[in-house]
Structure formats: C-alpha cells, structure tokens
Amino acid sequence: MPDTITVKVPATSANCGPGFDCIGLACAIYNTFTLSCDDVPGIRLAVTGQGKDFLKPSEKNFAVMAIRRVLSEIGWNKPGLDIKMRNDIPMSRGLGSSAAAIVGGMTAANAISGGRLSRERIFELAAEMEGHLDNVAPAIYGGFTISFMENGKPRCMRLDPPDGLQMVAAVPDFTLPTKLARDVLPKKASYRDAVFNIGRAALLAASIAKGDTSFLRFSLKDKLHQPYRGKFIPGMENVFAAAGKAGALGSFVSGSGSALMAFIPKEADAEMIGGKMCAEFARFGKTAVWHVLGFDLKGACVV
Ligand code: HSE
C-alpha cells in the first residue's frame, strides 16, 4: 500500500438554474490533497491557496472528518494524519468547496488504505456527510449529473457535456453561506412554478444528452430558488443580461451563490464575457473576478 497518496477533486456547480437540488456539473478547477496516515497521533495540516489563513487541523475539518469516516468503515484506524491541501476552488461561493473537501478526503483515504470502497459507496458516504447530492455527485463522477434519493440511497446518472460548450464564472468578493441561501426559500412552491422548472430541467438534461445547445437559453431559467436568492447577490439579473448580450447561451446562480455562471460556446470571446459580467457586478458596488472553466470529465481521482 502507498505511504502517501495525492488526489485531485473538481469544483462543482449545483442546480444549473432549474435543477434545484438535483442537477450539477464538474468544473476544471481543482483542490489537491496529499495524504499520509501513520501511528503518531495528531493531525498535521498544511494549506496553500483558498482557506490557508483559517483552515485548522481539527477533527471538525471536513477533509479530516471524511478521512476518518472512510478509515473507520474500512477498519484501518490510524491515529496520525498528515494532510497537504492545495486549494484553488473559491470557498463559500457556490462552487462546491465543501463537497470537494469531503470527496477529496474520502477518495484519498480509500486509495491509501487499498482502494476497497467503490465509487458508489463513496457517493453514499459523502452524500450522508455533505447533504447536497448535486455537488457530491459531479465531484465524484465528473461531467453533468442528475442525482436523487431512492429508498434512502443516493443515485445518479452522469452525462458528458457537449464538446462545444464551456463556462465563465463571475466570482464576487463576498461569501454566501448555503444555510442563509436556503433559509430564504419559501416552504411551498406553486404548481405554476413547479411546472415551469420541470419543463426547463427536462429541456436542460435533454440538451446536454443530445449535445444540442440551441435550447439552452430557455432551459437555464428557474423559478424555485434564484428569485429568492437574488436579494443576496446585488445585480444578479443585470449580470445575467450582460452575459447574454455579450454572447453567453444562458446563465444561472452557481449552487446557492454567490458566484454566477454562464454557459458559452467555445468559440465565444470568454474574456470579454467575463469582463462584462464583472463590470456589471462593479456597477452594483461588488468586486468580482472571472474564470473561464472547462468541464471536468473524470471527477475525483488519484494523480
Ligand atoms: N442545491 C443546493 C442549494 C446546493 O442550492 O442550496 C448547495 O451548494
């Protein structure tokens, strides 16, 4: 068995507009975990990149909890953990940094202890710990995922996104905790809004499956969560409009925000679109940076 293992895990964007709590996709921006386990008690954690100033080596750290969960499932209880994290995924912006920590920790712990757990089992354990299937599924499987619970078990179908498509994320300099962004949602939805979303989510999944982007501008619309979350994301509708005017096929709140994501054709001027999105955020007093992102197709893997 290896002494040290390195795993990389992609960022994820949940919901993709109408697919609230079920659709997600994996983006080619990564956190990397290097893990060694030994018999010297204690957690050594070295973080570079996002979170380096506040991630602490404690039993409450998501990656540590995830590693412990897998090691105890396997019955390989090493008291000492040495973890090095290189974090490029922005935190608390709706890009799946918590799912990445959990899936990365579980994948690394599984690999270092002999790879006895299947990806399906890691999906179950990670879903239980994280709670959001729509981030966990693409972090594990890559691509575009549709996930759901059936008889208490998480299930997912994975699709390859079309070749000609990429994304631009406009990431503002403020965080939006998922709990706050969920607490603002109403307890009930109207039939009219539910029907609106069912149609759009079906259209989105069909567009991705067929590789046909011609309907994307209709299919990314949502009435179940974005209208309520807009109050936390100044200029949201204006950023969407600016992206569309600059050539994006459609845009949506990434996960529960604060980042906004646009789908663009590969031949589009991604830098110009990102610049226009951030300029619109600036008009509303918010500094933002943009990232051009490809899709990740592999999910969490040992490197
Ligand atoms: N589907 C979840 C939400 C994703 O929108 O609250 C959280 O990352």
Image (cartoon, rainbow, N blue to C red):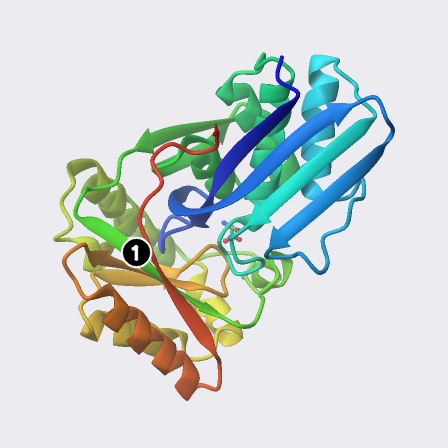
229 over 114 or under it: above or below: below
170 over 20 or under it: above or below: below
Q: Residue at x 41, y 79 (%)?
A: 281
Residue 290 position within the rendered picture, expressed as x and y whole percent measured from the top left: 38, 67
Residue 220 position within the rendered picture, expressed as x and y whole percent measured from the top left: 29, 56
Q: Amino acid at mark 1?
A: Met
Residue 76 position within the rendered picture, expressed as x and y whole percent measured from the top left: 75, 15
Could you say which quadrant of the image residue 113 lies in? top right
User: In the visual, does 45 lie left or right of 208?
Assistant: right
Q: Residue at x 32, y 44 (%)?
A: 295
Callout 1 secondary element: strand
- Could you tell me which quadrant the N terminus lies in? top right
User: In the visual, does 107 lie left or right of 140?
Assistant: right
Residue 35 position within the rendered picture, expressed as x and y whole percent measured from the top left: 65, 31
Could you say which quadrant of the image residue 132 lies in? top right
Can residue 128 be seen here? no
Q: Which residue is mark 1?
A: 167
